[in-house]
Amino acid sequence: MNAIRCIIADDEPLAVGLLRNYVMRDERLELVGAYTDAHSALEAIKQGKSELAILDIQMPDLSGIEVARVADEMGVRVIFVTAYREYALDGFKVHAADYLLKPVSRTEFAEAIDRICRSTLPAVQYLTVRSEYRLVRLPFNEILYIEGLKDYVKIYVSGRERPVITQMSMKSIEQALAGDTFVRIHRSFIVAKARIEAYDRTTVYIGGNALPIGDTYRHRFATEIDS
């Protein structure tokens, strides 16, 4: 089983440190972000970086409940970690997978992850990005390729005349894409394997366009495309 990509958000640094330690010692989990504010966690979820969010409920400006609502919409599982038992009902209203009371022991944390692993994590079949002040859902199987332009990326999608433009790094979008469905061929290009029409040593042809294969990506591309 692939490690579950997870994020942590708690406004108490000590709590973040403890949870980070638990995650790092659990081979079933991959920590992709640890935050002391809810806004950073929300942005990570919107960018599709995680499959599991471990959240405090009471945080300044934005509550864990509000973050969990977005997580639920995007198929991201949530474990609440809080000092307040009375929030349990609110937690389950947003379909939280588990609810742990502080102080959380390593055993309690491991048991919660056991329950997550026994259940079926919903497969994220789309990429969600912010474009023109809206959240746009792009099915993986409709994405042709992605072009990086400094602080922005252009996402070329089948059936759309114009690419979807969003402020996001190539590294972030690469992490958000599904397993082995996509491959990076250049510092500026990620392509959908299933959409490749033809290729040679230096070029990939996709969507009627010729995209260069960078020298540093050539071996990786050859390995992945033939696997």
Image (spheres, rainbow, N blue to C red):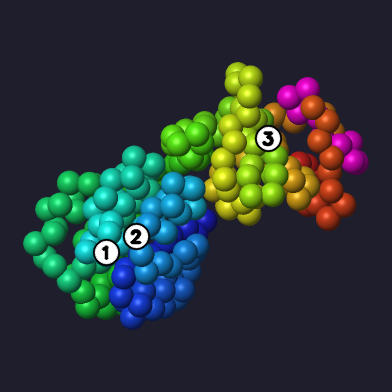
Q: Which residue is mark 1?
A: 60
Identify the element where label 2 is drawn. Answer: helix
17 on left or right of 111: right
Q: Which label lies toward us, 1 or 3?
A: 1
* Placement of the C terminus among the 4 image quadrants: top right
Disc 3 crowd, CA 10 A, few/some/many (<14, 14-19, 20+): many
The boundaries of the magenta stretch are 200-208
Mark seen at residue 145 = 3
Which mark, by number, is residue 38? 2
Q: Does the CB distance between marks 1 and 3 fall below 8 Å?
A: no
Is there any visible trace of residue 179 in the rendered image?
no
Taking depth in this image into account, of 31 and 108 the one nearest to the observer is: 31
Residue at x 18% of width, y 50% of height? 92
Instruction: Using the numbered discs, state the Cα–Cα distance from disc 2 to disc 3 in whole angstroms.
Output: 31 Å
Residue 26 location (% of width, % of height): 43, 71
Residue at image point 30% right, 62% down: 55
Disc nearer the start of the sequence (1/2):
2
Residue 202 counted in the magenta span: yes
Badge 2 density bin: few <14, some 14–19, many ≥20, Cα 10 Å: many
Label 3: which secondary element = strand
Q: Is residue 32 visible?
A: yes
Disc nearest the viewer among 1 and 2: 1
Q: Quadrant of residue 189?
A: top right
Residue flagged by tag 1: what amino acid is it?
Pro
